[in-house]
Image (tube, helix red, strand yellow):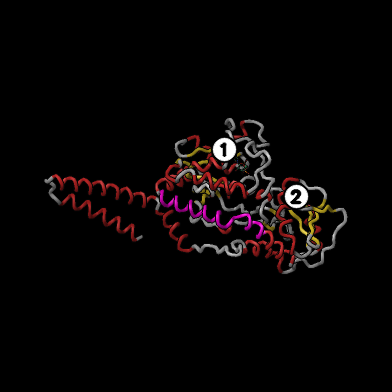
Amino acid sequence: MLILVYIIFLTIFAGHLCEEQFCSADNEIKSCKENEIAHQNSLYTKEINERYKKYLVTIQNAEQNYKECNNTKHKCYKDAIVRDLRPFKKKGISKEMIEAAKTRGTFYQIIKGKLYREKDCMFPARCAGIEHFLLKVIGNLSDMDLVVNTRDYPQSSEYFGNAIPVFSFSKTPQYYDIIYPAWAFWEGGPAISLYPRGLGRWDQHRKTLNKASLEILWEEKKSKGFFRGSRTSSERDNLILLSRNKPHLVDAQYTKNQAWKSNEDTLHATPASEVSLESHCTYKYLFNFRGVAASFRHKHLFLCRSLVFHVSDEWMEFYYHSMKPWIHYIPVPKNADQEELEDLIEFARNNDDLAKKIAHRGRDFIWNNLRMSDVIHFWKQLLKSYSKLLTYNPVLKKDLINIRREL
Ligand code: UDP
């Protein structure tokens, strides 16, 4: 605010000087011209500040209220565990509730430090991605039964009866599902031509994205919005349309996915080629949208040190709650039309230092607080807290298979 007042004061003062003085000598003319330019610049700054006041004030408020999460001992996400287990706190989790949950996911048991699973898993690569983490943490855990949903969509809606104890990777606040870190941190993510074995290995992506982000300075990045992905949700359409109307502002195109049948599925355009996550780093503004549920793209975008435009805060993964709008990313309303999208991009283009600051804060958050060790620790804490809610002593069931550590 002080800076704004100072700029306005300078603007008036500089303009006034030039009008009042009789600038006959050369040096006086020069200094008048400089003042004139400064005056124009200040007017421009003032106009920009006025135009984007609502965003600037929101950022200022967000900064005042923001308290960085303390991740010593991996505690950044403990609230997420408390929140998701709250519906089960009063009465606990009974054998009957687990039986009811079984139709919603894959049944696992942890008994005497060993992991067991029902024979069939709907998505074997996803189960493998989940088991990688379970095997890392079961050592000191109490015996427990758990049902893990490997579908994209959550299973226990608050509109349909009581809370069912089922673990899902993503949900909106309208679901009781207990969020766990997605399989794709290790393996089983969407298979696209660039990642034919499925997006995974967050540990490796962290390194390659960090390297890619260091190979290009913020100032060298293209001042454009960017998105590549399939039409898993129509919430992505307006950005694609804006890109078609204003290609100088956005490059957003639909790619094929396995469900693609015709150009209708890519909003009446030929599918675009896929672009690696590392290549996203050459753009300043990267868009994240939900897909069927939360999109795995989210965490990767931040590591580019580009500014993330996160559309809608409905769909969550376990770490999303600890990231704050205007602090770590630009929040975009779910139904933002082309005009709103354009306005937000223009805001970033006209406030480059601020855009860079938010981009770097977002990057630092993910880099410092979403390490593989944080994911492992989250699983451990989650299962520890969950197992305390069981109201019975689990007994090893017949017909389960023992899942062993990969060699
Ligand atoms: N993806 C990518 N480059 C592309 C298209 C997709 O890296 O050109 C990645 C993207 O980051 C996402 C995954 O592939 O994590 C699947 O993207 P898609 O848009 O098909 O589905 P989503 O899971 O986002 O709904």
Can see residue 238?
no
Residue 158 among those drawn in magenta? no
**Disc 2 versus disc 1: nearer the observer:** 2
Q: Tag 1's secondary structure?
A: loop
The residue under the point 66% across, 48% down is 184
Does residue 353 appear to the left or right of 363 in the view shown?
left
Please name the residue shown 60% across and 56% down the image.
319
**Foreground of the two, 371 or 44:** 371
Q: Does mark 1's beta carbon lie closer than 8 Å to ligand 1?
A: yes
Q: In this view, does 216 lie above or below 139?
A: above
Region of the chain picked out in magenta, as a range: 352-378
Q: Which of marks 2 and 1 is nearer the N terminus?
A: 1
Q: Where on the picture, by quarter, is residue 232?
A: top right
- Disc sitting over residue 275 in the figure: 1
Asked if one can make out residue 273 in the rendered structure from this viewpoint, the answer is yes
Do the CB atoms of the residues marked 2 and 1 lie less than 8 Å apart? no
Outermost residue, bottom side: 90
Question: Which quadrant does ligand 1 occupy?
Answer: top right
Q: Residue at position x 25%, y 46% from top?
A: 37
Tag of residue 407: 2
Q: What residue type is labelled 2?
A: Leu
Q: Marks 2/1: CA distance?
A: 33 Å
Q: In the rendered view, does 81 fall on the left or right side of 103?
A: left
276 is higher (above) or lower (below) than 354 = above
The location of residue 117, given as percent across then percent down, is: 80, 53
Question: x, y (%) of residue 376?
Answer: 66, 57
The answer to whether the beta carbon of the residue marked 2 is less than 8 Å from any atom of ligand 1 is no
Crowding around mark 1 (Cα neighbors within 10 Å: few <14, some 14 to 19, many 20+) is: some
- Is residue 356 found inside the magenta-colored segment of the image? yes
